């Protein structure tokens, strides 16, 4: 036994010798890799990306380091560079876990570009078990976000539940729980009740809890009894414990009635700079007309000059008690990602699928325009509609809204056509819409068959009882007479607010006679009695381009309604941009004024909202 020991040791030494010699050669790569990992842990993503890219050019494991470099670039906000790098990686050189990571990074890039459908497709191709724990967290986070963007709220919550089971950091767990509650808060009570899984399922516990929280202020005693029952039924639920105690202590959205410092976030540089100046004019006009404004201080910030989250904290540190803005949807979404908003925000746009405590979303949404004009037509007794809109991005978006609301009312969509906005000859689109082209084709087929000319009078369709129209004033002045010429003389036309310039011009607008449209109250001085009035800003309005004129009213309301925000869930505020109502998901909807063009001017202006304005809002 003893005699064999030297041989064994010699054998082991011979085996280990090559490995020992290879260490110095690989040592630089190992050290650089560890350095990059440390940078990633410290959120130094750009520096880590450079190290990983250097390794990908020299180290043996090139595909692995390219993946890591792409991941670092993505975390640094360089999604296009990350996409280019991912595209250069040959998939055939990757093992299954690396392929899963590559697909996950591709999904994250899709999300960064707003492509939720593409992200969901890629995520469905991944086997989660092939990812390490850190990337499993990334997977469920991406899946939850993609599902939320696609409107699948319950699916998003399920993914966050899976994410929560993989989180270790208490702060990350708390933020994830808050996101679950905020997502469920967007759902109506009926959904929370009817779509609950059976207890003690974790999702069921969240849904019951969200429903209880919706009723907390209605009957506090009943809430306490039902909450005790919930705790007994779900003793091991992830919401039970410290998180729930903090949640119940957290105050609901509150706005100061008279904030002394108001920060305004608007993009004064870039493509929205002109719109921002108009909104600023509206805010300043309302501020000047306010008898109590001497105690308030307005501070304007360029929201394009800084990261929105950093800008928010800078304004709060400067003493802001309320934020008005931002204007861009992406910036609103970025603010909603802040854990909590200690200083409330009145955003000037509405981001889809975003709900956040202390974040109220207000804007000139085309959904409001579409809903109001559809409701007006429905209340007038119309049921079968044609749709005529420009072949533009906005035209197609409004077509979706009009069709959605019309079908919700129970109306029939007979046909829709899109016209070229670069021409004033709309005969092709109108003749197709009114079935005149089909009538002409039947005539020509008959002439060819009989081999002789015959008397012919085109027959227009008779099944439609209304036409929904989107057109600018100039386009409408040419389009409306052509509609009448091609057989729609007796079909009522309902137009979105785009049809009106905001300023009465009877000589030009006589060709719009007969069209009913819905627009902001500020354009109707007999109905809007607030300050500043339409007449007081008439000169400024004339010098404002047509597409921006309604933004003056947006700015007026953004300032004037501040003292009434806490009351607007129960009754409408009579604003310049509409009668305004705050919904449970912190969005402000607008009810508009509808009028008919007669003798070239809007006549018979009236609200179609059933809720009357309360005198308590009067100054």
Image: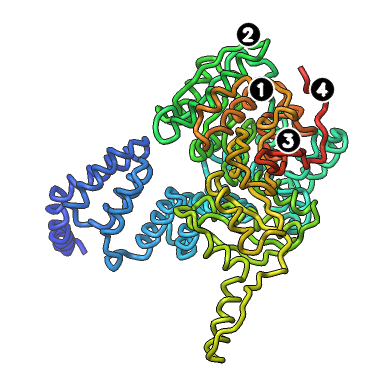
Quadrant of the rendered image containing residue 614: top right
**Does residue 361 appear to the left or right of 579 in the view shown?**
left
Tag shown at residue 533: 1
Front-most of residues 572 and 551: 551
- Up the image or down, 330 lies above or below 316; here it is below
Measured as percent of width and height from the top left, residue 179 is found at: 60, 42
The residues bearing labels 1 and 2 have C-alpha atoms spaced at a distance of 22 Å
Residue at the image position 54 percent from the left and 88 percent from the top: 452
Which residue is disc 2 drawn over?
Answer: 295
- Up the image or down, 461 lies above or below 67; here it is below
Disc 3 element: strand
From the image, state whether disc 1 or disc 3 is nearer to you: 1
The answer to whether the residue labelled 1 contacts the one labelled 2, judged by CB atoms less than 8 Å apart, is no
Tag shown at residue 616: 4
Q: Residue furthest bottom?
A: 450
**Does residue 224 appear to the left or right of 514 in the view shown?**
right
Disc 1 element: loop
Q: Earlier in the sequence, mark 1 or mark 3?
A: 1
Q: Earlier in the sequence, mark 4 or mark 3?
A: 3
Residue 602 shows in the view: yes
- Up the image or down, 491 lies above or below 206; here it is below
Front-most of residues 226 and 320: 320
Q: Earlier in the sequence, mark 4 or mark 2?
A: 2
Quarter of the image with the N terminus in it: bottom left
Residue at the image position 36 percent from the left and 47 percent from the top: 79
**Does residue 605 appear to the left or right of 495 in the view shown?**
right
From the image, state whether disc 4 or disc 2 is nearer to you: 4
Which residue is disc 3 drawn over?
Answer: 581
The residues bearing labels 4 and 1 have C-alpha atoms spaced at a distance of 20 Å
């Amino acid at each position: 036994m003893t005699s064999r020991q030297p041989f064994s040791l010699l054998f082991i030494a011979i085996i280990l010798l090559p490995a020992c010699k290879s260490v110095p050669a690989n040592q630089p790569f190992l050290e650089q890799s560890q350095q990059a990992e440390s940078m990633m842990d410290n959120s130094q993503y750009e520096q880590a990306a450079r190290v990983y890219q250097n390794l990908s050019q020299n180290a043996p494991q090139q595909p692995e380091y390219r993946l890591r470099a792409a991941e670092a670039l993505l975390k640094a906000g360089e999604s296009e560079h990350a996409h280019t790098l991912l595209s250069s990686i040959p998939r055939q050189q990757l093992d299954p876990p690396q392929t899963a990571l590559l697909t996950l990074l591709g999904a994250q890039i899709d999300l960064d570009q707003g492509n939720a459908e593409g992200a969901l497709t890629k995520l469905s191709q991944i086997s989660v078990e092939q990812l390490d724990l850190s990337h499993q967290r990334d997977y469920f986070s991406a899946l939850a976000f993609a599902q939320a963007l696609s409107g699948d709220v319950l699916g998003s919550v399920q993914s966050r539940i899976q994410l929560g089971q993989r989180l270790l950091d208490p702060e990350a767990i708390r933020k994830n729980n808050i996101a679950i509650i905020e997502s469920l808060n967007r759902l109506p009570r009926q959904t929370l009740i009817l779509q609950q899984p059976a207890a003690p399922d974790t999702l069921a516990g969240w849904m019951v809890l969200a429903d209880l929280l919706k009723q907390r202020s209605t009957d506090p005693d009943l809430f306490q009894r039902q909450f005790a029952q919930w705790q007994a039924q779900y003793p091991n639920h992830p919401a039970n414990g410290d998180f729930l105690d903090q949640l119940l202590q957290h105050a609901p959205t509150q706005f100061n009635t008279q904030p002394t410092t108001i920060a305004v976030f608007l993009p004064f540089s870039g493509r929205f700079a002109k719109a921002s100046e108009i909104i600023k004019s509206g805010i300043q006009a309302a501020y000047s007309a306010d008898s109590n404004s001497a105690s308030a201080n307005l501070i304007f910030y360029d929201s394009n000059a800084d990261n929105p989250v950093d800008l928010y904290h800078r304004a709060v540190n400067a003493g802001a008690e309320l934020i008005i803005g931002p204007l861009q949807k992406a910036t609103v979404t970025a603010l909603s990602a802040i854990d909590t908003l200690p200083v409330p925000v009145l955003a000037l746009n509405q981001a889809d699928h975003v709900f956040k405590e202390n974040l109220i979303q207000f804007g000139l949404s085309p959904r409001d325009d579409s809903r109001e004009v559809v409701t007006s037509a429905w209340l007038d007794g119309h049921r079968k509609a044609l749709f005529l809109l420009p072949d533009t991005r906005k035209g197609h978006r409004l077509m979706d809204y009009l069709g959605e609301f019309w079908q919700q009312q129970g109306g029939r969509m007979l046909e829709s056509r899109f016209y070229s906005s670069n021409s004033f000859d709309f005969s092709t689109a109108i003749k197709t819409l009114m079935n005149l082209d089909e009538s002409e084709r039947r005539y020509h087929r008959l002439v060819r068959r009989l081999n002789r000319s015959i008397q012919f009078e085109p027959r227009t369709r008779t099944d439609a009882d209304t036409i929904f129209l989107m057109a600018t004033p100039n386009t409408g002045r040419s389009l409306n007479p052509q509609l009448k010429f091609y057989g729609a003389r007796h079909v009522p036309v309902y137009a979105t607010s785009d049809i009106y310039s905001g300023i009465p011009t009877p000589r030009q607008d006589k060709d719009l006679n007969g069209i009913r449209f819905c627009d902001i109250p500020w354009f109707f001085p007999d109905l809007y009695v607030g300050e500043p009035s339409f007449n007081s800003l008439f000169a400024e309005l004339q010098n404002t381009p047509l597409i921006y004129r309604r933004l003056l009213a947006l700015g007026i309301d953004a300032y004037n309604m501040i003292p009434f925000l806490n009351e607007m869930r129960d009754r409408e505020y009579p604003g310049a941009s509409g009668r305004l109502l705050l919904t449970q998901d912190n969005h402000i909807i607008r009810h508009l004024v509808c009028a008919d063009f007669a003798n070239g001017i809007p006549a018979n202006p009236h609200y179609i909202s059933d809720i009357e304005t309360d005198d308590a809002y009067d100054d």
